[in-house]
Image (tube, rainbow, N blue to C red):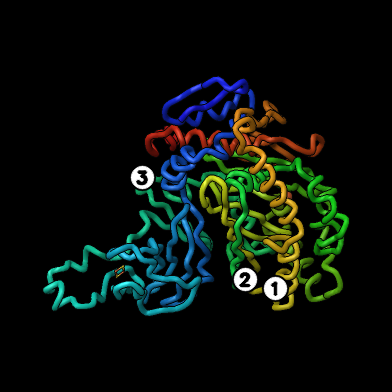
């Protein structure tokens, strides 16, 4: 492909190289990576085929035979639990002519029967039924070779299910590295116990007319776009009825960005003051406010100083966004061509929370996130118009700047005795840094240039 300079000259031709489009020294990123068809096709191969992707939560497939139709990159996959209680992820495509073997969102079944010619597959993926097997195939088709296509690796981490098509990808926990403790902030119970989360039934799915990297970079920790949410802050949709989250917590906290350059994951965190316990005021329900006050106390007890660290938006490379609390959700930005993204959003609660708490959170989540959520609507408006305004022949010649806070990241960062892994920027005073966004594009460009995981697992030495 040809990349053009600002005055219309050809700057480079030939195969796309990630590092020529992402300049980490100046903090500039070419707009082509958001709008080019050719780059999009290459990232499906180089990024989405190699990465670990979030496909769902085990609470969605609690019983044998339960399934949930999910997605990896552009493709439909089936997350299911077989009769022996084993969890699988299969490509949702019949081995005969490719028809989707399951066209429902979720359910329970003993077999997936293809609607086209009727091949059927058991929930462990094996081909168990072929119409006219005797008369038309003369019993010669080797059914053992034609089962559903299964992912190369799968991991159930505290109930969250992750999968990759790449047999050479490092195991999921190695892929996470030290980011694990920040994923835990989303998956662990509010009171600090390990795991214990479940998904509120019903995953929200909707389309946005923009490249998948617009939401991905925003949820990497775009701490700069508060102006976008000014109206929703004034409306006061937060649990305490003010702001969009609980402002008292945030105002007292130290704010950090934490990123892992070798993995491409990153997050924001708040570190609450040592001597202040600030249980959020959960409006008028004593059941709800008592629950969270108790949880806050227990978490501080069981986790010590780390109990003061609460999460804000972050992301696991490439397209899984985490929002650990207020609201507590996981989103996946599914690519749907260079100019469209399909968002899937899962909402989490403590499995053993009282029904009133779950119901309270469900209402809060919906008014914050999703297509009807006031905060997410603000964001989508920006991504939509920014993408459209970046597609034109002139527009795509001009790079974006990500130089904010360049060079202010610190290794071995310590705060009140808490030693943070990764690279940290303290944004308490500066309010914002584009460090996490650069981290996303650094890793993206490495994936675009790498031949295999041999080049990507640099931590192995
Ligand atoms: Fe499924 Fe033919 S496409 S049986
Ligand atoms: Fe936002």
Q: Is residue 358 left or right of residue 124?
A: right
Give the Cα distance between marks 1 and 2.
8 Å
Dot placed on the residue nearer the N-terminal end, 1 or 3: 3
Callout 2 secondary element? loop
Dot placed on the residue nearer the N-terminal end, 1 or 2: 2
Q: Position of residue 388 (x, y in %)?
A: 65, 43
Local crowd size for mark 1, using a 10 Å CA cut-off: few (<14), some (14–19), many (≥20):
some
State the residue position of label 2.
200
Q: Position of residue 426 (x, y in %)?
A: 74, 36
Q: Is residue 348 above or below residue 209?
A: below
Q: Which mark is residue 358?
A: 1
Q: Which mark is residue 224?
A: none
Callout 1 secondary element? helix
Give the Cα distance between marks 2 and 3.
34 Å
> Which corner quadrant holds the C terminus?
top left
Q: Is residue 164 visible?
A: yes
Q: Which mark is residue 168?
A: 3
Q: Position of residue 278 (x, y in %)?
A: 83, 58
* Dot 1 and dot 2 residues touching (CB under 8 Å): yes
Dot placed on the residue nearer the N-terminal end, 2 or 3: 3
Q: Is residue 301 visible?
A: no
- Marks 1, 2: nearer the viewer: 2
């Amino acid at each position: 492909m040809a990349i053009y300079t600002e005055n219309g000259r050809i700057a480079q031709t030939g195969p796309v190289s990630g590092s020529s489009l992402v300049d980490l020294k100046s903090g500039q990123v070419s707009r082509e990576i958001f709008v080019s068809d050719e780059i999009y096709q290459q990232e499906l191969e180089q990024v989405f085929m190699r990465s670990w992707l979030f496909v769902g939560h085990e609470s969605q497939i609690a019983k044998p035979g339960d399934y949930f139709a999910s997605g990896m990159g552009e493709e439909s996959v089936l997350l299911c639990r077989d009769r022996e209680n084993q969890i699988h992820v299969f490509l949702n495509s019949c081995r005969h002519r490719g028809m989707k073997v399951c066209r429902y969102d979720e359910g329970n079944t003993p077999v997936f029967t293809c609607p086209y010619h009727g091949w059927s597959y058991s929930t462990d993926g094996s081909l168990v039924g072929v119409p006219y097997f005797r008369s038309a195939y003369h019993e010669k088709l080797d059914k053992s070779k034609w089962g559903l296509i299964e992912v190369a690796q799968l991991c159930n981490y505290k109930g969250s299910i992750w999968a990759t098509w790449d047999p050479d990808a490092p195991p999921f926990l190695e892929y996470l590295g030290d980011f694990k403790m920040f994923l835990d902030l989303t998956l662990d119970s509010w009171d600090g116990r390990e795991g214990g989360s479940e998904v509120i039934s019903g995953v929200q799915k909707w389309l946005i007319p923009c490249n998948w990297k617009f939401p991905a970079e925003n949820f990497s920790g775009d701490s700069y776009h508060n102006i976008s949410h000014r109206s929703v802050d004034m409306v006061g949709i937060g649990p305490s009825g003010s702001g969009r989250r609980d402002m008292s917590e945030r105002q007292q906290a130290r704010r950090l960005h934490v990123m892992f350059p070798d993995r491409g994951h990153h997050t924001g965190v708040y570190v609450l003051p040592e001597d202040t316990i600030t249980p959020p005021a959960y409006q008028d329900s004593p059941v709800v406010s008592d629950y969270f006050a108790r949880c806050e106390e227990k978490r501080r007890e069981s986790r010590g100083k780390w109990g003061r660290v609460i999460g804000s938006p972050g992301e696991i490379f490439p397209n899984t966004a985490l929002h650990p609390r207020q609201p507590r959700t996981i989103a996946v930005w599914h690519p749907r061509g260079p100019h469209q993204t399909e968002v899937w959003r899962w909402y989490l609660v403590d499995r053993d929370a009282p029904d009133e708490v779950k119901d309270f959170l469900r209402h809060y989540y919906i008014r914050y996130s999703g297509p009807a959520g006031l905060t997410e609507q603000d964001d989508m408006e920006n991504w939509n118009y920014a993408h459209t305004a970046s597609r034109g022949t002139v527009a795509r010649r001009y790079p974006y700047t990500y130089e904010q806070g360049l060079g202010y990241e610190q290794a071995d960062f310590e705060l009140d005795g808490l030693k943070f892994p990764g690279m940290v920027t303290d944004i308490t005073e500066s309010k914002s840094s584009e460090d996490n966004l650069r981290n996303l594009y650094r890793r993206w460009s490495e994936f675009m240039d790498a031949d295999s995981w041999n080049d990507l697992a640099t931590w192995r030495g």
